[in-house]
Image: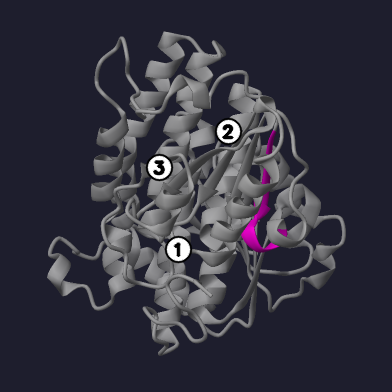
Amino acid sequence: MTSSSLSSTAIDRSDHSEFPHLMLKEIYQQPEVLRTCLAAYLTGNRDVPINLNLPIELYNDLDQIHLIACGTSRHAGLVAQHWLEQITGIPTRIRSGSEFVSAPLPIATNTLTIGITQSGETADTLKALTINQTRRSELGDRFQARQLGITNQPNSSLAQLVDHILPTWAGTEIGVAATKTFTTQLAVLCCLMLDLAVRRGVIVSAQLQQWITVLQQLPEQIARILEQEGAIKDLAQQLVNSSHCIILGQGVNRAIALEGALKLKETTYIHAEGYAAGEFLHGPIALLDQQIPVIAIAPEGSSQAAVLETVRKVQMSGAKVIGIVSNREATPDLFEDCLVLPAIANELISPFLTVIPLQLLAYHIAVLRGLDVDRPRNLTKAITV
């Protein structure tokens, strides 16, 4: 197995009018909308650096957080679950809206329930939130519903249902496959996590400023990844005839493995599956042969070793392995091709960056297959029925 880095071939996308598809235009809008979203919640005031305009009563004495979402929004929720549990220490559970309807999460005291939906009209999420509210309405004060919504449409049905709304400020997203609304959902959820962490006293001012500095660097770092679109298009040429694909992540990037697989399924109709790298060894690795490419998300950080260990075992199957890494020199012989991300100061922030090449890869494979990338078959922008 030979190993080579992807070249940094650039495609000039400075003029948005030249984008052939809405999905690609919206991928390229991510630096801009992320700046807008962060500016809405980061004040620049060192005394009060985050302002979500939420009442303290929403946060008081929290015992649990419940997240309800579907599809790409659920994957944003999985990233947030990792942040909330690892940074704030608040037990956090996530369930898809459709599963909550048939199997609601157990009622717990002092619970903040967060509904995440880009459209604010996702029927399963709205129904789940309604059920949660109804179940709690006749119980005591400690069980009453505290419901927060995160959406790109602040005037949607979600806003009529929950107590408070945090808009994502992504602007209109027309392409069916969510891209810029995903990264702005992450931004809002990260600001919420940091606000909770400060109020609970689990991070100090200097640590908060470090997080904010890293967040404010993200738009420029995403722009640098977009400059590698030519190399990602070349990689798409290699994968265009694949029928299956495996994406591996670990820790906070397990959710990005799932999101990358969803983008491939939605836009290219390739059967793709995302797995936690360690869990992949417990059965699913039996799927592999030389015909199934594997993409490994392995930025530097505490989770990298587990991903690389799995990659070493994957190599034995003869599968083509592609790496998404932040330091090429740390993995000299493990990947046939690599996409190198900008340096990541905080591994927990890496999902903002690791998702971008997967969005572009899905887009270019779909185009090479001659598919309608903006309107995939059987899908609508919001499932409202």
Residue matched to label 2:
83
Q: Callout 2: helix, strand or loop?
A: helix
Which residue, as the protein is rendered here, is positioned at the far bottom?
370
Tag 2–tag 3 contact (CB < 8 Å): no
Residue matched to label 3:
165
Relative to the observer, which residue lies in front, 173 or 317? 173
Amino acid at circle 3: Ile
Residue matched to label 1:
121
Question: What number is the disc on residue 49?
Answer: none
> Which picture quadrant has residue 69?
bottom right
For marks 1 and 2, the one nearer the N-term is: 2
- Horizontally, residue 114 falls left or right of residue 368, namely right
- Horizontally, residue 122 falls left or right of residue 288, namely left
Q: Residues within 10 Å of mark 2 (few under 14, many from 20)?
A: many
Which span of residues is magenta-colored?
92-99
Q: Is residue 208 above or below residue 272?
A: above
Relative to the observer, which residue lies in front, 281 or 17? 17
Q: Callout 3: helix, strand or loop?
A: strand
Tell me if I can see residue 9 in this picture: no
Q: Disc 1 to disc 3, how far (Cα)? A: 13 Å
The rendered magenta stretch, by its main secondary structure, is classed as strand
Q: Residues within 10 Å of mark 1 (few under 14, many from 20)?
A: some
Amino acid at circle 1: Glu
Q: Does the stretch in magenta take in 316?
A: no
Q: Disc 2 to disc 3, how far (Cα)? A: 20 Å
Q: Disc 1 to disc 2, how far (Cα)? A: 26 Å
Q: Does the stretch in magenta take in 93?
A: yes
- Comparing labels 2 and 3, the label whose residue is closer to the camera: 3
Tag 1–tag 3 contact (CB < 8 Å): no
